Image: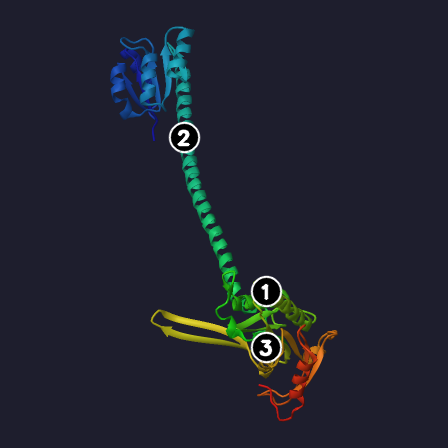
Amino acid sequence: MKPTLIYVDDEPHNLVVFEAACPDAWDLKVFDSAGRALEVLDLINPQVIVTDQRMPGMSGVQFLEIARKIAPNAVRIIVTGYSDEDLVVESVRKAQIFDYIRKPWDVDDLLASLGRAIDLFNASAESRRLQDELKAREKELSETNLSLLSALRDLELAKVKESKMRQELECWVPPFVLWTIRGQESKIGKTPDLIGIAMDIIDSSRLHDITFEGRPIRGQVIQIFTEAVLRHGGWRESHSGDSAYGHFGLLEERENPSESALAAAHEFRAGLKSLSEISGVQVECGISLHIARKCPIQLHSVHLNTPRGPITQKSFDTSSVDIDLLHRMEKHVHQLPGSNIVMSKVFAESLRTIPVNTIGLGSHLFVGQKDPVELLLIPSYYVKAQDISRIRELATDPNSHAA
């Protein structure tokens, strides 16, 4: 596209000479009046404005000062026939001229000055284009950055929510179930040897309406049992009001889970004693320990279409004759005073050392069991010799079956 130049001069001869000097490659507009040039300046939008200084009504500097406001990007050149340094200074200060040309001009010098002005305009235009493009990119990047920051905040919030949800989920779901979901190694579907621990509140009916510090006593007993089991690496699998069952050997790999189970039993019994003292309510439990050999771990899944949509519920449990025996053993010591710990002989033999205060109770045949089970007792402080004799008599009576 041709560069557009404007030349203003009140002398027609100078306009003719200027037009003759300029090449056809330029789009040249000439005016013999500064006023007429200003009327169409915004329509022409020239790259270069050249004006004579000495004109009637309006000087070249005055014209260029006004033209700078209308076409601020145009390159301005003033032509003067006088050697006036003050004029040059005034032109630069007021009109911000690029160059000045003295009359009579040398054609080569004139064309060289106009060529430099056109190059300056093109360079400035390219610079403005690049600056506008840079500003647009900066705006785009700023908006993108804000969008990314917003997305990052949303992601962080989602991570926090996910973490809290995972923590809450882990409170409800056994860790080994979560391991299975994540594809990690677990014992679900296998038949490990589990160390079982069970407890039941003795004479629990008298505690049904009793609370301590605003909470039911029975619920606090379950909490003490659960904390003892978890603290020593086990898992409380189930509870129902007055009783609870847990196991060791599934949640954590320990060198001797039997030792951990026994420690949990002792801690639970100590916790019962403390609860009884601070609440003023006597709470006693039967506590049993036994080994469930090759205990199957059942994973149950129920899928049902309901009016609310499809629902899938999954659960697991450990069940075997040994676990049934664990609960029967615990019931067997309810007739003894205090909170007593009863162990099967196979459990006691798995310990590194059998506690010194352990008492043998003989072999007992429980309902549902094929063979009698030899029991040992870690008695409470309240157990007397006659209490032990009464339990042993049941063991020696071949016609007696424990419940």
Please tell me in which quadrant of the rendered image residue 105 appears. Answer: top left
Q: Which amino acid, by three-letter code, is at mark 3? A: Lys
For the residue pair 164 and 305, the one nearer the viewer reads as: 164
State the separation of the CA atoms marked 2 and 1: 83 Å
Q: Which residue is mark 2?
A: 128
> Is 234 left, or right, of 123 in this rendering?
right
Q: Earlier in the sequence, mark 3 or mark 1?
A: 3
Q: Is residue 224 visible?
A: yes
Could you tell me which residue is drawn at 39 percent across and 12 percent down?
91
For the residue pair 153 and 53, the one nearer the viewer reads as: 153
Q: Which amino acid, by three-letter code, is at mark 2? A: Arg
Residue with the most extreme bottom position: 399
Q: Residues within 10 Å of mark 1 (few under 14, many from 20)?
A: some
Q: Earlier in the sequence, mark 3 or mark 2?
A: 2
Please tell me in which quadrant of the rendered image residue 146 appears. Answer: top left
Q: Which amino acid, by three-letter code, is at mark 1? A: Leu
Could you tell me which residue is drawn at 27 percent across and 9 percent down?
57
Mark 3 or mark 1, whichever is nearer to me = 1
Q: Quadrant of the N terminus?
A: top left
Asked if 45 appears above or below 178 in the picture, the reply is above
Residue 197 placed where, x, y %? 61, 74
Q: Secondary structure at mark 3?
A: loop
State the separation of the CA atoms marked 3 and 1: 38 Å
- In the image, which disc is placed on residue 209? none
Q: Is residue 19 visible?
A: no
Q: Which residue is mark 1?
A: 275
Q: Secondary structure at mark 2?
A: helix
Mark 2 and mark 1 residues within 8 Å of each other at the beta carbon: no
- In the image, which disc is placed on residue 190? 3
Q: Earlier in the sequence, mark 2 or mark 1?
A: 2
Mark 3 or mark 2, whichever is nearer to me = 3
